[in-house]
Image (tube, helix red, strand yellow):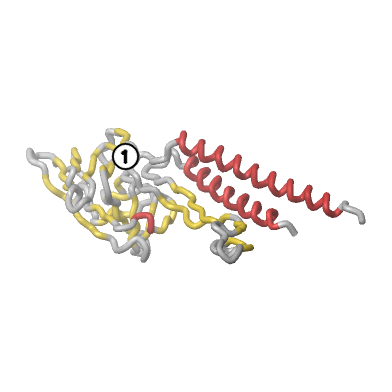
Amino acid sequence: MMQSLYTASTGMLGMQTQIDTTANNIANVNTIGFKKSRAEFADLMYQVQEYAGTSTSDTTKSPTGIEVGLGVRPTAINKIFSEGSLKQTDNQLDIAITGRGFFKMELPDGSEVYSRNGAFKMDDNGTLVNSDGYKLVPEVVVPEDATNITIGTDGTVTVIQPGQTEATQIGQITTTNFINPAGLHSLGDNLYIETDSSGQAVEGSPGLDGLGILRQGFVELSNVELVVELTDLITGQRAYDSNSKVITTSDEMLQTVNGLKR
């Protein structure tokens, strides 16, 4: 059987992975805080017919050898944590991180998750939560009679209450960073959890120790660039087509061999 059939099939599978990754990026072009992914590949092992340096005579050696590649395989789908553009919303509970860092939230089972999506709301107790009701950590509770909420670039949360002329601090928003954010595990819903590859979470005040500052009244948009994704989509499609042509050509060659007569 011709090796090209198997080699081209690995190419088609690889390009399918790239197209699937690109499709997910495009689907989330308007998802707040979404971070795009990039498929990465490596060539497979080689079938060696002659090693480089093999003697070709008493005084000469083969300078290159003969090695036939056996295809390609996906090695990683890497999350790109570059910063997305900021969009002004004028909603006082929308917060964007300018720079490094994640918001920490708590799931109903008590486990901690992280997100770049700062579109927060208030629950029936005045606690800041995300769209799924997961509480921001540390917890921030807004008094029922608060008339104005201000969130500083350093995460300080203050409110104005009736009868008061000065703002009262009600909480402190912190952010969390990882030495390798690409190693975080994606849960969906713009949430990530810590893994051994990401390193341990390092929590601190926004603007300190390399953490980004906060911007009230803004949200961070997806970092997906449609022009780049559409180019990758076309490239993946053409490469997929080319690999299918290799399979068709190999099949035609086999058909020719099977049609030979003595």
* Residue projecting furthest to the right: 262
147 lies left or right of 121: left
- Give the residue at mark 1: 219
Question: What is the quadrant of residue 237 in the picture?
Answer: top right
> Foreground: 168 or 67?
67
162 lies left or right of 185: left
Q: Position of residue 169 (x, y in %)?
A: 13, 48
Q: Position of residue 246 (x, y in %)?
A: 69, 47
Residue sitting at x 69%, y 57% = 3
Q: In which quarter of the image is the N terminus?
A: bottom right
Residue sitting at x 34%, y 45% = 82
Q: What is the three-letter code of the residue carrying label 1?
A: Val
96 lies left or right of 34: left
Q: Is mark 1 on a helix, strand or loop?
A: strand
Residue sitting at x 67%, y 57% = 6
**How many numbered marks, from 0 up?**
1
Q: Where is residue 44 in the image (x, y as percent from the top left)?
A: 56, 59
* Residue projecting furthest to the front: 59
Residue sitting at x 42%, y 41% = 31
Q: Where is residue 2 in the image (x, y as percent from the top left)?
A: 73, 57
11 lies left or right of 22: right
> Foreground: 241 or 143?
241
Q: Is residue 138 above or below residue 219?
A: below
